[in-house]
Image (cartoon, rainbow, N blue to C red):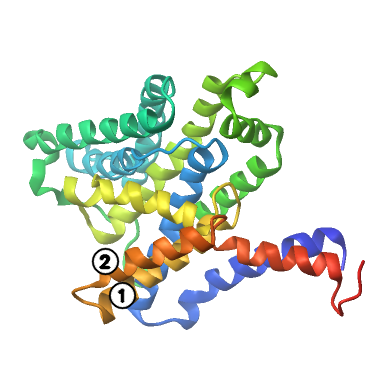
């Protein structure tokens, strides 16, 4: 097996399996659950550009998610555009919002930065909620469908896979590029990074722009799938927290971490809601605490440690 094949066959197998799922999974609930896993994997990878590699704890990514959802919906409802044009409009608006928000919030560090991003998202939510004539306010409105029947669940499922693949490709590039090394330097010590010629303000903003675009695109397809947008569904702070948890739980500043985090967080949340109807949040919180304490590197550290051990001792225990 050549080094190239050895490196990329797990990725190819993963995408081949998920692409084939609508062909052999016919339960609508299961497809919806896996669809949510994939959407939040995209969101986790997008957040990871800023929160993982650059170490900037953003709690305002729901703003870009909501911008994508509302831009697609209102461009169809108010202007009569094709919903796909609305999706692109949302991505552009999210990038502009990221440029403005990032230019202001990246002047701050630590908890002050986190709180400022939270405040920015809350400002957008309040503005949307109070614009009754434009956005339907707190009531919300129906979102247009990006795909039509028949097999609408499968079409949405396949529609999110190119987005996941693009986010995965960009994450892989960042992980192995000089840009990614600069972001890690900023995360470890911003002052030291500046001393060796890194421009933190520019690099953090360059990481935020694609992060906002991917978050907006995921917001558009998510809102279209569930056919509704409202401040309490696409602009709620819980989405920002969940996205950050997904990346950190799976493994921040890694390529596969957000995917693993999305699988673990989404599935365990669904299981706990089913079997611990009244106490699921308590059990859910305890699980997160245990993982954070015993797996500070995220769930992916279980796999990386094993792979590192196998490379050191070999398959039969002989020292390499």
Classify residue 79 as left or right of residue 288: left
Residue drawn at 43 percent across, 19 percent down: 107
x and y, in percent, of residue 218 in the image: 39, 50
Classify residue 184 as left or right of residue 314: left
> Mark 1–mark 2 contact, CB under 8 Å?
yes
Check disc 1 and report the residue beneath it: 272
Check disc 2 and report the residue beneath it: 281
Q: Is residue 40 above or below residue 118?
A: below
Dot 1 falls on a residue whose secondary structure is helix
Please state which of residues 277 and 41 is positioned toward the viewer in this rendering.
277
Q: Is residue 101 visible?
A: yes
Residue 298 circle label: none
Please state which of residues 27 and 177 is positioned toward the viewer in this rendering.
177
Dot 2 falls on a residue whose secondary structure is helix
Q: Is residue 156 visible?
A: no
Residue drawn at 60 percent across, 34 percent down: 188
Query: Residue 76 occupies which quadrant of the picture?
Result: top left
Q: Is residue 133 above or below residue 241?
A: above
Quadrant holding the C terminus: bottom right
Query: Residue 179 occupies which quadrant of the picture?
Result: top right
Quadrant holding the N terminus: bottom right
Q: Earlier in the sequence, mark 1 or mark 2?
A: 1
Classify residue 183 as left or right of residue 226: right
x and y, in percent, of residue 111 in the image: 38, 33
Q: CA distance from mark 1 to mark 2?
A: 8 Å
x and y, in percent, of residue 101 in the image: 36, 25
Q: Is residue 75 above or below residue 169?
A: above
């Amino acid at each position: 097996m050549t080094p190239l094949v050895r490196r990329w066959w797990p990725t190819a197998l993963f995408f081949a399996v998920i692409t084939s799922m609508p062909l052999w999974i016919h339960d609508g609930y299961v497809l919806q659950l896996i669809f949510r896993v994939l959407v939040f994997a995209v969101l986790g990878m997008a957040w990871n550009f800023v929160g993982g590699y650059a170490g900037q704890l953003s709690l305002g990514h729901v703003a870009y998610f909501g911008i994508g959802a509302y831009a697609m919906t209102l461009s169809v409802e108010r202007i009569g555009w094709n919903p796909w044009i609305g999706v692109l409009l949302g991505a552009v608006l999210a990038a502009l919002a990221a440029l403005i928000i990032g230019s202001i919030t990246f002047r701050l560090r630590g908890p002050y930065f986190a709180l400022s991003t939270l405040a920015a998202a809350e400002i957008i939510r309040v503005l949307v909620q109070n614009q009754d004539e434009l956005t339907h306010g707190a009531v919300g409105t129906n979102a247009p469908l990006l795909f039509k029947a028949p097999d609408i669940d499968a079409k949405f499922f396949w529609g999110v896979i190119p987005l996941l693949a693009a986010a995965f490709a960009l994450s892989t590039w960042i992980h192995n590029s000089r840009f990614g090394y600069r972001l890690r330097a900023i995360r470890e010590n911003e002052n030291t990074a500046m001393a060796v010629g890194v421009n933190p303000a520019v690099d953090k903003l360059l990481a935020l722009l694609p992060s906002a675009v991917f978050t907006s695109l995921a917001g558009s397809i998510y809102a279209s799938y569930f056919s509704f947008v409202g401040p309490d569904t696409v602009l709620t702070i819980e989405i920002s927290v969940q996205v950050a948890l997904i990346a950190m739980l799976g493994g921040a500043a890694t390529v596969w971490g957000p995917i693993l985090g999305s699988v673990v967080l989404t599935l365990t949340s669904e299981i706990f809601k089913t079997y611990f109807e009244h106490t699921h949040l308590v059990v859910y919180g305890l699980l997160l605490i245990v993982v954070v304490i015993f797996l500070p590197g995220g769930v992916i550290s279980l796999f990386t440690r094993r792979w590192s051990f196998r490379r050191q001792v070999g398959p039969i225990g002989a020292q390499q």
